[in-house]
Image (cartoon, helix red, strand yellow):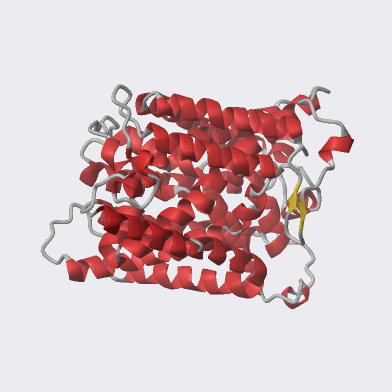
């Protein structure tokens, strides 16, 4: 308990945390879904840009707060100053139950699934259990089937990945840092290679004005164009998810009040530019109809199919790039999220042992193990699949509150020196807050069942908070 986290991550590593957290598999897949929704390449590209700019508004708002509150736990600590301990706890609880653990489990599963797809192309496969066991269903509902033995080989590999990376993080953040820097840099170079190759070999000249004969927007599931554009942006937000992870590591970043705002600003901008360029590149290779056809096929990755058309090894290259990016993104989540539980435990709002720092490795080793165990359980049950569908919805409740908190802290802490101030204050924080509110309300309207489950998981934290608070008062 007496050991302390060691500040050892520099600015470059902090930037790579932001980039590595965001670039997973989404950018290689979502163009198909978005094309099927919008039927126009220009609108698809605009959806990526608007989603990126909104993400940047949230990132810049977060950067201002990170510049004045540089403690482990990131938004958990920020929310204490903004709204008090209860709201901060609900964020931490949501991170543990849904946001951080389900994300790590999902990305680890995508890694294992992608490797299995590569093996399948060479007539190999990860081992599976007999159908009689794989079909065993312990729980069935409209949205979720609990089938622990289904996709056994993929699940086993995903679990192995989570366990191995957790123990690497257990032994020191410097190892996870090296993985992030090397693999993150490799992914960026790989994406740039895809962009250059597509621009050289892609045959399409009208990148921004590709259309397909369209059923009028009102006839597509009776949704307006605005609703469809909004759904396309939600798809893009999955690819932008994770930009706030760097704040959780404030206790291990050198000069965090300066480094974290730089990392948030530069890292988010870099990803926005890369995402826009790579999607332009994809439209150079295949037209809007090409991606709509892919959207109708299950287990087909848009980027793999696109690159196969211009290079004999293009699909394999993208598959390897997805493996590297999802491996790296899993490492990023397992590295950053346990710092939230560590900060909560320091306040008596999580299991007490989560506050322990390893005397030799200087890591919150028990918090890392707790995060690992919950991720493994989510993979076994397959529940991460359902949870990730409500991930953006739950996350934006807290993202919006975080942006509005910038205004609260300007009034609450007017004399505090701010190394970084969000540009165009208060417009950017307010626009991001309003958008977050619209997204949350729209999610409730479009998917009331899943939204209620997401809210329910967050609100389960209320009795837990009350119990922990009473224990703290008893000890005092």
Query: How many marks on residues?
Result: 0
Q: Specify whether residue 429 is in view.
A: yes
Residue depicted at x 76% and y 71%: 220
Residue depicted at x 84% and y 42%: 135
In the figure, is residue 259 to the left or right of 118?
left
- Between residues 376 and 184, which one lies in front from this camera angle? 376
Residue 1 picture location, percent across and down: 27, 34
Residue depicted at x 29% and y 70%: 426
- Between residues 117 and 278, which one lies in front from this camera angle? 117
Taking 171 as reference, is 352 above or below it? below
- Between residues 261 and 224, which one lies in front from this camera angle? 261
In the figure, is residue 278 to the left or right of 386?
left
In the figure, is residue 85 to the left or right of 306?
left
Task: Name the residue at the front extreme.
Answer: 474
Task: Name the residue at the right extreme.
Answer: 132
Residue 260 picture location, percent across and down: 29, 45
Residue 82 picture location, percent across and down: 28, 65
Taking 438 as reference, is 193 above or below it? above
Residue 445 picture location, percent across and down: 62, 75
Residue depicted at x 61% and y 41%: 377
- Between residues 164 and 262, which one lies in front from this camera angle? 164
Taking 296 as reference, is 318 above or below it? above
Q: Quadrant of residue 467?
A: bottom left
Q: Quadrant of residue 104?
A: top right
- The quarter of the picture where the C terminus appears is bottom left
Q: Specify whether residue 24 is in view.
A: no
């Amino acid at each position: 308990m007496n050991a302390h986290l060691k500040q050892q991550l520099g600015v470059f590593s902090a930037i790579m945390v932001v980039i590595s957290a965001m670039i997973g598999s989404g950018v290689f897949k979502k163009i198909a879904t978005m094309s099927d929704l919008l039927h126009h390449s220009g609108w698809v590209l605009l959806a990526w840009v608007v989603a990126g700019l909104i993400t940047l508004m949230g990132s810049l708002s977060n950067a201002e707060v990170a510049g004045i509150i540089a403690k482990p736990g990131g938004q958990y600590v920020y929310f204490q100053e903004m709204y008090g301990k209860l709201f901060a706890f609900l964020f931490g609880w949501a991170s543990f139950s849904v946001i951080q653990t389900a994300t790590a489990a999902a990305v680890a599963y995508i890694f294992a699934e992608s490797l299995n797809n590569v093996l399948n192309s060479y007539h190999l496969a990860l081992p599976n259990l007999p159908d009689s066991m794989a079909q065993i269903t312990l729980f069935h509902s409209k949205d979720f089937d609990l089938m622990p033995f289904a996709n056994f080989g993929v699940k086993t590999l995903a679990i192995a990945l989570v366990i191995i990376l957790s123990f690497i993080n257990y032994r020191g953040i410097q190892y996870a840092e090296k993985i992030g820097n090397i693999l993150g840099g490799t992914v960026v170079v790989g994406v740039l290679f895809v962009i250059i190759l597509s621009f050289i070999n892609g045959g399409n000249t009208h990148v921004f004005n590709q259309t397909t004969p369209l059923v009028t927007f009102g006839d597509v599931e009776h949704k307006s164009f605005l609703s469809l554009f909004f759904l396309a942006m939600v798809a893009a937000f999955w690819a932008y998810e994770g930009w706030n992870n760097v704040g959780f590591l404030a206790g291990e970043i050198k000069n965090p009040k300066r480094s974290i705002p730089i990392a948030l600003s530069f890292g988010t901008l870099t990803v926005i530019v890369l995402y826009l360029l790579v999607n332009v590149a994809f439209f150079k290779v295949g037209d809007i109809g090409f991606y709509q056809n892919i959207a109708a096929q299950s287990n087909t990755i848009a980027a793999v199919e696109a690159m196969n058309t211009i290079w004999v090894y293009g699909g394999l290259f993208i598959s390897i790039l997805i493996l590297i990016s999802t491996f790296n993104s899993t490492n990023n989540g397992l590295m950053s999220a346990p710092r939230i539980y560590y900060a909560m435990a320091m306040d008596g709002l999580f299991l007490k042992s989560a506050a322990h720092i390893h005397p030799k490795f200087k890591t919150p080793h028990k918090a890392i193990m707790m995060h690992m165990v919950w991720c493994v359980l989510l993979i076994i049950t397959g529940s991460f699949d359902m949870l990730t569908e409500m991930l953006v919805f739950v996350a934006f409740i807290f993202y919006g509150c975080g942006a509005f908190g910038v205004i609260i802290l300007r009034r609450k802490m007017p004399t505090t020196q701010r190394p970084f101030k969000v540009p165009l204050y208060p417009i950017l924080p307010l626009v991001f807050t309003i958008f977050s509110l619209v997204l949350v309300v729209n999610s409730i309207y479009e998917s009331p069942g899943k939204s209620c489950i997401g809210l329910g998981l967050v609100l389960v934290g209320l009795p837990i908070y009350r119990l922990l608070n009473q224990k703290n008062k008893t000890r005092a």
